[in-house]
Amino acid sequence: AEDGYDLWLRYRPLAQADAVRPHATQLVAPETTPTQSATRAELLRGLSGLLGTDLAVQPTATADGAIVVGTPASSPAIAALRLKTKDLGREGYLIRSARIDGHRATVIAANDDIGALYGAFHLLRLVQTAQSLDALDIREVPRTQLRMLNHWDNLNRHVERGYAGESIWDWHKLPDYLSPRYTDYARANASIGINATVLNNVNASAQQLTPMYIEKAAALANVLRPYGIRVFLSARFSAPVEIGGLKNADPLDPAVKQWWKDKADEIYKAIPDFGGFLVKANSEGQPGPQDYGRTHADGANMMADAVKPHGGKVIWRAFVYSHETPDDRAKQAWNEFVPLDGKFRDNVMVQVKNGAIDFQPREPFHPLFGAMPKTPLMMEFQITKEYLGFATHLAYLGPLFEETLRADTQVRGPGSTVAKVIDGSLHAGTLPKGAITGMAGVANIGSDRNWSGSHFDQANWYAYGRLAWNPYLSSRDIAQEWARMTFSSDDAVVQPIVGMMMGSREAVVDYMTPLGLHHLMGRSHHYGPGPWVEGGPRADWTSVYYHRASKDGIGFDRTTHGSGAVSQYAPPVAAQFDDVKKTPEEFLLWFHHVPWDYTTKSGRPLWGELVHRYSQGVDYVRGMRRTWDGLKGRVDDERHAQVATFLAIQEKEAQWWRDASIAYFQTFAQRPLPEGEAPPA
Ligand code: GCU
């Protein structure tokens, strides 16, 4: 059944198979390690499914059309080719058309088994997307080192902000029962180069670090290891008190330091290649070093020292904001972290959300990017759609990720993009020696058959992985790839789907939070409109805090005359955002409080433009429904029907967002709807 379980690794018979078969007659691939076995099995599975033939597995190439896979150490045929594999590192690979013993062959060569596995997935992708296998000359090395998923999964299998069922980790049955799903999870991740996973929620339970759960995590690590995926755990800062019997968790207390050292030793005994700890501290009520008057650096360094002898890392989150918010929340992470630049151990990374508020449909890039030249900063994207309509709304996040990565911090002149901060190239001269680079994505994976809660949400997992591997890829190219692999290699199907996807996130921005508005979702669940939310337990947990609508206008003044948040950016960027005329319109109300009659770029007054954007968002969803209806019969009925139903939900709810938001803002604007705009139902 087309239930989506196979993700983008469907391997169904390919229409263009005839052109590929001559390139896939034999397979020469070693099988003496678990990673080699996985590589061989994937190629056999993929190519036999796609081409409808069984490849002969051979010790050497004896005819034209062999696929030869391996490393100089694992494969005499690869060694004999004397390819330059050393500079590929552990994870890079080459794919080349070559001659072996006089026979035409396709070679996948790497320096290490895992590189060969990545190369095998790349070759399969070429076939799945119906690209020519003639004269191949591909060289790939990942641009970042740690390409990680963050599961916000609790031990009771509830997933925080998860919309795809329960946690895929069945803690109750671990460590003895290993669901085959874990292996398929590993395959899917390896196919896009994801090499690390944090198993549990950043709002962590200390129980995760008890012997029983360490044993369970070790069992998962054993399944993931052949696919190059290392396990990390979220650590609760107060664990020494909660499960260690200590009186406090003060990072400067020798007993606390010793506790973490012992805990690290215990974990590494069970998981020798354990990646390290992810920590959310002093944020949203979580414990942290500030509880003892210490800094984030004190806390991070103490834990970093504990894992250092084992080669482990500490990833410290910069998503912090204090309980009492006297100041603009958007400024708080920068205020707390910039003074700590250069004060972290060399095995600490600071993980920064893409924007300064919280995974909104659109945010300007976080001002921390570029502002900590001595600290490796990891990007944190949210793959799960907490603020973008959960699993039912179709929103392809590739353009959101791309927009952030391409944003120009200007800290070292024009071209100082966020991508260059993330891949370490911008601050190569100032980062600690041996600093590693990386990206994290908050996973959208659950126990649903289709993994992500909807067929199209699989694209967000896919796009995240591809951009973590290479932050310079285009989200449109990624959408093309994904649509071909997931739905069809027929252009008449692929192009309309890609068209729908590419504008879908912008549509969400339009019908939820146009023109730089943000955080107007219903309180705590974040689903559906709630611009009227006020009087919460905290000022910044209300919507009125963010939109500041009044009779005279709307928007959050973050200029030098307002909260001053613009000054956290490099001077040219700050100057641009400080000036209402120079601020890109998509960030207008993020940075400025603007009168209702302000003339926008379209010539419409702000009020009219706002209404126009809301309507435009709804129209886009209607357009997606029409496009999708046109694909009936070209996409299998099962997936077609589910997507169609979800799009109907999305249209209804986009309309709800529009109507509710307009009706509410109209109470301040006190102006009629522009001509041609339907009044809210
Ligand atoms: C958001 C989200 C929380 C999450 C937090 C975080 O605020 O709503 O559920 O815990 O981000 O990233 O830590």
Image: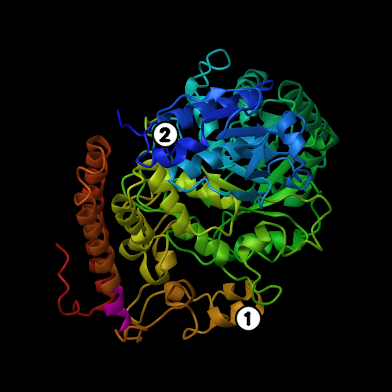
Residue at figure coordinates x 72%, y 61% from the top left: 425
Which of the two residues, 298 or 678, is positioned nearer the viewer here? Answer: 678
Under circle 2, the secondary element is helix
**Which residue ends up furthest to the top in the rendered image?**
176
- Residue named by callout 2: 50
Which callout, 2 or 1, points to the residue nearer the camera?
Answer: 2
Residue 162: horizontal and vertical position, in percent?
Answer: 43, 39
Q: Amino acid at mark 2?
A: Leu
Q: Secondary structure at mark 1?
A: helix
Instruction: State how many labels appear.
Output: 2
Q: Which residues are magenta?
A: 605-611
Q: Are marks 2 and 1 in contact (CB under 8 Å)?
A: no
Q: Position of residue 182 (x, y in %)?
A: 52, 25
Q: Is residue 31 visible?
A: yes
Q: Earlier in the sequence, mark 2 or mark 1?
A: 2
Q: Position of residue 512 (x, y in %)?
A: 33, 61
Determine whether 524 is above or below 2 in the image.
Answer: below
| Drawn side of residue 415 relative to residue 644, left or right | right
Q: Residues within 10 Å of mark 1 (few under 14, many from 20)?
A: some
Q: Compared to 539, does 570 lie above or below?
A: below
Q: Which mark is residue 572?
A: 1
Q: Which is nearer the eye, 320 or 472?
A: 472
Looking at the image, residue 290 lies above or below residue 269: below
Viewer-closest of 338 and 348:
348
Residue 603 is drawn in which quadrant?
bottom left
Residue 454, x across and y down, in percent: 34, 41
Q: Quadrant of the image for the N terminus?
A: top left
Write down the quadrant of residue 48 in the picture: top left
Residue under the point 54% across and 61% down: 355
